[in-house]
Amino acid sequence: MARLFGIIGNRPDLAARVLAFESDALRVRPKGSPLGWGVAFYQGGEVLMRRRPIDERPDIDVASLASDVRADLVVGHVRHATVGALRTENTHPFRYRQWVFAQTGTISEFDHIRDRLGASVPDFLRSGIRGDTDAEVLFHVFLSFLHDAGRLNDGQVDATQMAEALRSCLAVVDGITSEVGAPAANLNLLVSDGNQLVALHRSGAAMRLRVYNGKADADAIIGDDPNLRRKIPELSRTHFSLVASDFDDAPPNGRWKAVPECAIVTLSRDDEPRIEKI
């Protein structure tokens, strides 16, 4: 019922085409309650956001949310609210400067541990929390670890440092939930600084990868659009990595690969995704 997705590649003019090509796999159909959605994307080094806290359409076509976007990195989220009301402040993705973050899954007993989680965040970051969700608090815990490492305002944060900050987030959450007798949180996360995209999968809700690379995949994306084909002479260099989670059913084609449980995936514009254990 929810959906988390991110795409990164080396052709800003084709990202929307890739999402459209996978529209059936990414489509979300609400079951009972209305959904909300948001997308964040990078243009000219700036983060742009679109968020709609309530969308009562019979299905959410994820591809259409970014159909006019020209960007090589997009993070999106379709929200089935579990913590926090349906309002803009609670709608993912969340942003701090160049950082964006989105999550599915819920931190166990969040109402009981919110204050303790928030206490681990420096005042200057905690004052930026606007909504009621566990995801926004977790995002700021992540930012606090980057701050401690002196990397919060660094324009070139290494993906390894991002992964370590995510691991530290989970360690803090697991420690506090364990103390109150709650189970470990099952979460899917996406975070980006505009240079790379890092996904974390620790949930029963499946996460999958789809990689487009080279001329054959580019031909499939472009289709029979002669104008677009003339504008892209070097099709063999085309590369995109698409990650998504919380599928109701397996994607309709066999080119999506399952991300193993308890894994961190690093995606970049030109390289194959790198998968490592949490």
Image: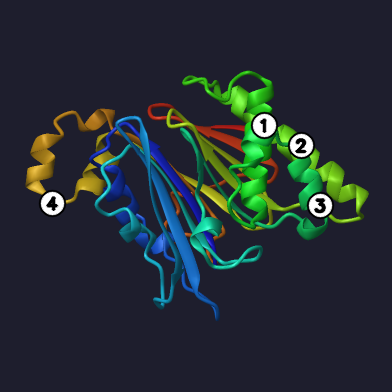
Residue under label 2, please give it: 120
Q: Closer to the N terminus: mark 1 or mark 3? A: 3
Residue at image x 78%, y 59%?
Answer: 111
Residue under label 1, please give it: 144
Q: Closer to the N terminus: mark 1 or mark 2? A: 2
**Where does residue 205 sit, x and y in percent of width and height?**
63, 58
Mark 4 or mark 1, whichever is nearer to me: 1
Q: Label 1: few (<14), some or many (≥20) within 10 Å?
A: many
Type of residue at label 1?
Ser
**Mark 1 vs mark 2, CA separation in Å:** 8 Å
Looking at this view, is 254 or 74 the one in front? 74
* Residues under numbered marks 4 and 3 in contact, where contact means CB atoms less than 8 Å apart: no
**Considering the image in quadrants, where does the N terminus appear?**
bottom right
**Mark 1 vs mark 3, CA separation in Å:** 17 Å
Residue under label 3, please give it: 113
Type of residue at label 3?
Ile
* Residues under numbered marks 3 and 2 in contact, where contact means CB atoms less than 8 Å apart: no
* Residues under numbered marks 1 and 2 in contact, where contact means CB atoms less than 8 Å apart: yes
Residue 13 shown left or right of residue 199 in the figure: left
Q: Element at badge 1?
A: helix
Mark 4 or mark 3, whichever is nearer to me: 3
